[in-house]
Amino acid sequence: MRIITSETITRTVKNLCLRANKFLPSDIKLTLDTAYDYEISPNGKRAIHSIIENYKLSQHTNIPICQDTGMVVVFAEIGQDVHIVGELFEDAVNEGVRQAYTEANLRKSVVNDPLNRVNSEDNTPAIIHTRLVQGNGIALTVIPQGAGSENASAMKMFHASATREDIISFVVNCVQENRGKACTPLIIGVGIGGNTEMCTLLAKKALCRDLFTYNRKLYYTDMESEILDRVNRLGIGPENMGGSVTALAVNIISYPTHVSSLPVAVNMGCHVTRHATEVI
């Protein structure tokens, strides 16, 4: 049994919030650099150049990559041989978010109720997903997701007889119908299977998959490639200015489902799909 203090969790979450908001993951940076060469539209090329300059600037200043510093999503994989002492785990996570957003003057976008909409003043609470795993460590992934990309997301309960084409068309149409809401080029997370809450969770997780890794199931690798090709043929382009690079990647995660169900969720990530991970 390994003891981990709540103060360690708070400190780690705080650092991850700061890192994720100011440093774009290396796989996304490299993909953006490559996208500049592939973009055929002059306006699109200028837009990608500005995006690249923006992430470079954020690396050398104290300015976040995006002014919308998001609502914080935390994926926590807690080893079953860990004993947490001090505050409750969720309280420790939210304290880390509070410290990061108040001390670094990051934009606070969370309202304490969806209808009365009074700002919580510290960007808490976070959305926390906890999973018990083997081991004696805690893996924390922080995703500050802005509303532009989140608002362009969708979920649909398909009939169990839905075809591959039905699902591909749903994802492509989701991009087409929401043009202008999320800052292109996109990273598109797709969850297939499970139930209503599981497939949306899968889509969120899919945004964090390294862009240089492949789906373990060839069937889904082919679907990812086809969706990416069809999305990029929409002509929306970088920053919705027209061009050949509307999306950088499509990541699919699947899960077993009920014989009578076929849920599909799409979670959009903009060109600053921020996330950072640390293992305690």
Image: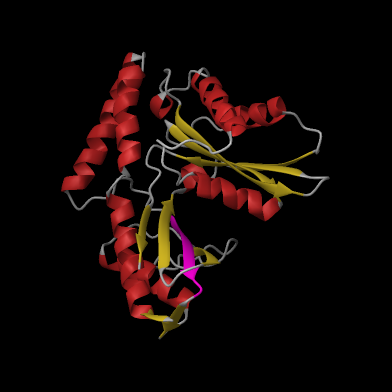
Q: Residue at x 22, y 34 (%)?
A: 53
Residue at 45% x, 65% y: name it. 119
Q: Residue at x 38, y 67 (%)?
A: 97
Image point 33% across, 48% down: which residue?
A: 67
Q: Is residue 251 above or below residue 40?
A: below
Q: Main secondary structure of the magenta part?
A: strand
49 on left or right of 123: left
- In the drawing, does residue 116 fall left or right of residue 105? right
Image coordinates of residue 34 in percent, x first then y, are: 31, 25
Residue 275 included in the magenta stretch of the image: no
Would you say residue 252 is visible in this rendering? yes
Q: Please tell me whether residue 245 is drawn above or below residue 26 in the rendered image.
A: above
Which stretch did the figure color magenta? Answer: 71-80
User: Does residue 233 appear left or right of residue 263 in this picture?
Assistant: left
When asked about the image quadrant of residue 253, the answer is: top right
Magenta segment includes 74? yes
Q: Is residue 125 visible?
A: no
